[in-house]
Image (cartoon, rainbow, N blue to C red):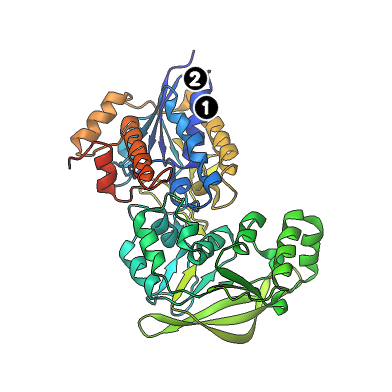
Amino acid sequence: MHKPIRVAIVGSGPSGMYAADALISQTAIPVSVDVIDKLPVPFGLVRYGVAPDHLSIRSVRDTLDKVFDKPGVRFVGNVEVGTDISVANLRDFFDAIVFTYGASRDRRLGIPGEDLDGSVAATDLVAWYCGHPEADRATFERLIPSATSAVVVGVGNVAVDVTRVLAKTVGELTHTDMPEYVFDTLRRSPITDIHVLGRRGPAQATYTTKELRELGELLDSDIVVDPADLVFDEASDQLIATDKAIARNVDVVKEWATRSKSGKSRRIHLHFMARPVELLGDERVHEVVVERTELDGTGAARGTGATFVIPADFVVRSVGYRGQPLAGVPFDETRSVIPNLDGRVQDGTQVVAGQYVAGWIKRGPTGIIGTNKKDATASVASLLADVDKLPTAPFATTADFDKWLAAAGVRAVGNEGWRAIDAAERALGATNGRDRTTIATNQDLLRAANLVSE
């Protein structure tokens, strides 16, 4: 019979929750799990990254939430590892730590003018309209009502989500759990044109067909595609012939290229073979200089030197996520991940005993939500295989950990606090005829969790 172990999971997104479920569902080794998150609420990008109007995808958090109903699993929210408690201190209370805190920052374009006012990251815009408590409300509530033309750089699902939210009428969004301040801002949006830039052709775009089709189904937005942008090389033809999803995407875009404008008040322009090379403006961006590209026969793109200019006072870069280092944990700056072998954290060629990693901070920002289940399960398998070699925590009880947090002045949100927040959001939504309305400030979340007074 193995001795009981305590495991801390740092990050409560899908990877963290799947790791917790894998640990608690096996019966060979007694395990108790604390899922720690810097926010007062769990579920990471399922709550703050998935588009609010994609209700079926966001509903996965109901499945993840059931993990907290299982004996031996606790949510420990409003605790930031690296700030409220160091990784070294965490080792005093847990026999193993699994880092699953994801890749929350954006990748940069690396072009002149990128830091002009009006140039923003998709990660920040998504956080704003999803009600993230750390979102920069002031910036977006100033920029969106004063913008008339937007450029979205990227042709992945996040770029499509951002485009769709900016192009939809508020009436098409009011069934969602977006905070009221988002609706108020979008009602005042004068944006008429949204230009989406993809540096390669339609066969190389990474959005999924379902998300793509939605752009052509909006109530008050026309879709505009120049047939001249539909460029295919030998590698593209091969992709279309062998990948049904890519073939469907190409068919959708080809059909859009045959459409005429119907006079709707907004237009979504899809530009392929186009990459931004400079943002122009005084203090605020006013124009985007775009270089025409060409495919090189392998599916890659290269610049042609030919440019054109798109007037734009709001630019959203959506070219990927990147992970961030955590003090006391090895980090690969080149790949923006925690180096590991089969989920075991590595420092150079040495395995760090008792430390594991799963999800985007393990492998980079690839895959869909379900991809994280297999990934987390594999990392947990490594942890369980190492159980006899794990360093024993000197204070491995729940009471010890809770006492330390209280002495440090940390107001942790537990399972009951999270349930109270969940109930408060559902009640707030009901007042507006919705299933839920997101509570969007830390203070209000802690108040709902009964951790601060009125």
Residue 270 image-quadrant placement = bottom right
Residue sitting at x 27%, y 24%: 399
* Residue at mark 1: 384
Of all residues, the one furthest to the top in this rendering is 1
Q: Which residue is mark 2?
A: 29
Residue 38, image x, y percentages: 34, 44
- Left or right, 369 with respect to 391, comes to right
Identify which residue is drawn at 54% across, 77% down: 276
Give the residue type that dot 1 points to: Leu
Vertical position of residue 153 compared to residue 246: above or below: below
Q: Nearer the viewer, residue 361 or 355?
A: 361
Around disc 1, counting alpha carbons within 10 Å, would you say few (fewer than 14), some (14 to 19), or many (20 or more)?
A: some
Which quarter of the picture shows residue 118?
A: bottom left
- Note whether residue 410 is visible: yes
Query: Residue at image x 31%, y 25%?
Result: 398
SS of the residue under disc 2: loop
Q: Compared to 205, does 29 lie above or below?
A: above
- The local crowd at label 2, few if under 14, some if 14 to 19, many if 20 or more residues have their Cα within 10 Å, is some
Looking at the picture, does residue 141 appear above or below residue 95? below
- Residue 367 pos. (x, y %): 60, 49
Q: Position of residue 189 (x, y in %)?
A: 41, 70
Q: CA distance from mark 2 to mark 1?
A: 8 Å
The amino acid type, in three-letter code, at marker 2 is: Ile
